[in-house]
């Protein structure tokens, strides 16, 4: 997984100390199916997710990450949920924690294809026949599909 340059520069100054970052999860719908990618780091299926670059609007991040990771053009329809992840420690000792913004997007064009080295597969899955995925990704998917007001989920993500 490529680490954004701004994080590498921060790590030069703070070492392995915990970084608080903003991330997005992009739940893309096309009718009764959703876009999922198989993560290169874990092999898990998940919606597309990524880190917000400095100065970037989070909705733009969601659209950019979908195009980069899955070769799909999609447009944000709404912010679905705001959550906080547990702190995560990487194998090299770096620690991070995220405010995660989950967006619901609609497919505009393109067929799923691996777009970068962050995933090994990409595809459409019927909402009633999703592959197994970690609870945190399933929760974000449920939030996006819930409709209504933005969910401010203050419980720690699984």
Image (cartoon, rainbow, N blue to C red):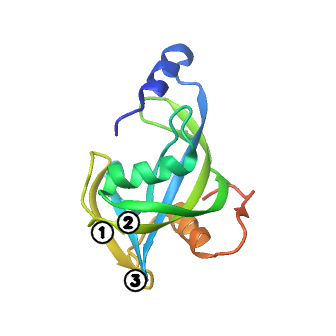
Placement of 34 over or under 6, stated as above or below: below
Residue 105 in the image: state x and y as whole percent: 49, 65
Percent x, y for residue 86?
62, 47
Q: Which residue is mark 3?
A: 129
Q: Element at badge 1?
A: strand
Residue 43 seen: no
Q: Single out the mark in the foreground, 3 or 2.
A: 2
Q: Position of residue 50 (x, y in %)?
A: 46, 47
Q: Nearer the viewer, residue 57 or 11?
A: 57
Residue at the spot x=48%, y=52% of the render?
62
Q: What residue would you read off at disc 2?
A: 36
What's the CA distance linking mark 3 and mark 2? Answer: 12 Å
Crowding near the residue tagged with mark 3, few <14, some 14–19, many ≥20 C-alpha atoms within 10 Å: few
Ranked by sequence position, the earlier of labels 3 and 2 is 2
Residue 123, numbered label = 1
The secondary structure type at the circle numbered 2 is: strand
Give the alpha-carbon distance from disc 1 to disc 2, as whole Å.
6 Å
Q: Residue at x 70, y 74 (%)?
A: 148
Tell us which disc is closer to us: 3 or 1: 1
Residue at the (56%, 47%) spot, across then down: 58
Secondary element under disc 3, as helix, strand or loop, is loop
Q: Is residue 84 visible?
A: yes
Viewer-nearest residue: 52 or 157: 52
Name the residue: 40% across, 68% down.
107
């Amino acid at each position: 997984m490529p680490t954004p340059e701004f994080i590498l520069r921060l790590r030069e100054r703070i070492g392995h100390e915990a970084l608080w970052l903003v991330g997005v999860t992009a739940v893309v719908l096309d009718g009764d199916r959703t876009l999922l990618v198989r993560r290169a780091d874990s092999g898990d299926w998940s919606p597309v997710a990524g880190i917000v670059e400095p100065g970037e609007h989070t909705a733009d991040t969601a659209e950019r990450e979908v195009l980069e990771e899955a070769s799909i053009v999609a447009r944000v329809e709404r912010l679905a949920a705001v959550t906080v992840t547990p702190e995560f420690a990487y194998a090299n000792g770096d620690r991070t924690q995220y405010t995660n913004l989950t967006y619901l997007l609609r497919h505009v064009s393109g067929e799923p294809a691996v777009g970068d080295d962050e995933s090994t597969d990409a595809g459409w899955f019927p909402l009633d026949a999703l592959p197994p995925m970690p609870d945190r990704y399933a929760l974000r998917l449920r939030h996006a599909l819930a409709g209504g007001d933005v969910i401010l989920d203050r419980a720690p993500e699984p």
